[in-house]
Image: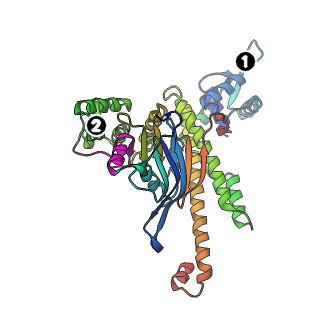
Amino acid sequence: MSDLTTTPVLELRDVTRIHGSGVTAVHALRGVSLSVQAGELVAVMGPSGSGKSTLLNVAGGLDSVTTGAVLVEGVDLATLSKADLAAVRRRAAGYVFQDLNLIPTLTAAENVALPLELDGTSVRESRRLAVDSLEAVGVAELAGRYPDEMSGGQQQRVAIARALVGDRRLVLADEPTGALDSETGEAVLRLLRRRVDEGAAGVLVTHESRHAAWADRVVFLRDGTVVDSTSYSVEADAASALS
Amino acid sequence: MAIRQGLLALLDEGPAYGYQLKAAFEERTGGTWPLNIGQVYTTLARAERDGLVAQLETDDDGRVVYEITAAGRTEVAQWFQEPVRRETAPRDELAIKLAVAVTAPDVDVTAIVQTQRGETMRTLQQLTRLKRDADEDADLAWLLVLDRLIFDAEAEARWLDHCESRLARKAGEKAVRRPASGRSPRAAQGSAR
């Protein structure tokens, strides 16, 4: 059994992703390495076309790598059968997108319970875990509502609840605050931050530095390469930010 | 300027002596702009000269207590009513550095931008950490000051991103223009723009 305290929840090892081939080949990622521990939120920044979304897609097993490896909780996704990969996607990682997060014909609780039900968990147990997860993000009262009966901020909270329902520990967020006003967006980030502090691992793709600043580490991508990375260190005197 | 108005606004709430004003000013702005006591007394002396405050008494410990005058109250009211004007651009070391770098031979401007963006990002992370630890209700004034600093730092980061893209585009244009010059109509069109 792997040691969960030291095995990163997500690890990218020298990942390259090339879309297409020959002269039209696009190098979306060129040798990217990244590791995210439990309790750690990593932000990925970069201009359009820098590889941010590809990074998130390979991290969640939605896209495969050309060379290199992606490990989720120590398991190399390339070694898995299609069925097992689908299971990892349901059990280990959850997505939060800018919009179109929830299935409109399902209530909040049904949306959150869905990945568990698909994975064979009983309806009753799935529903119980879904309500727990909604409670953890402070919107248990929305359990019976449909997406069009919720505000944008509420929908994003439900999406975070779904991303981290049950045992799922990895949340992959792609511009989750994009469609929200600045205060609602901040509330969503605060929530994401709290769930990570409680033991999840998170990757946050954003083009806004104000949002990236909620992360422990910020990785800058350009043309598929990590050009820079900054970490917040608790030792650094916080007051120096004010001088 | 803001120190004078800030101190006057505090005196508008009741008489106080120098150290009280210094402490109140720092508390209300979350300690973001610490004052030295000499600055407080200089400001009070000038305000007294201008008829905005008056010495009320010297207390048992020899501290001079000031109170606001009617003229001082008017100045405070005006301060709250009128917008803060941004007439002159403050001297900005970073803008000066980049402007000089981009026109200097043999300076890696992209490296300067990246180094600065890392630093700005760390500042943003520190400010955001302070915000996370602050209490929504008890620290409202402090949170507003923090937000101001966060938005300022964000603006700097966005400007740096913009500079980087612009520099990359310029470098790309140069690279295309040189070998293609006079041959490719598309390149000629591009450089004419």
Report the residue marked by disc 2.
A113
In the rendered image, residue A122, in percent from the top left (x then y), is placed at 24, 33
Which numbered dot is residue A35? none
Q: Amino acid at mark 1?
A: Glu
Q: Nearer the viewer, residue B68 or B144?
A: B144
Q: Amino acid at mark 2?
A: Ala
Image quarter of residue A217 = top right
Which numbered dot is residue B57? 1
Callout 1: 10 Å neighbours few (<14), some, many (20+)?
some
Q: Is residue A128 magenta?
A: no
Q: Which residues are magenta?
A: A82-105
In the rendered image, residue A114, in percent from the top left (x then y), is placed at 27, 40
Marks 2,1: beta carbons within 8 A: no
Residue B75 lies left or right of residue B66; in this view the side is left
Callout 2: 10 Å neighbours few (<14), some, many (20+)?
many
In the rendered image, residue B100, in percent from the top left (x then y), is placed at 72, 62
Give the distance between the C-alpha atoms of the residues marked 2 and 1, in whole angstroms.
Answer: 71 Å
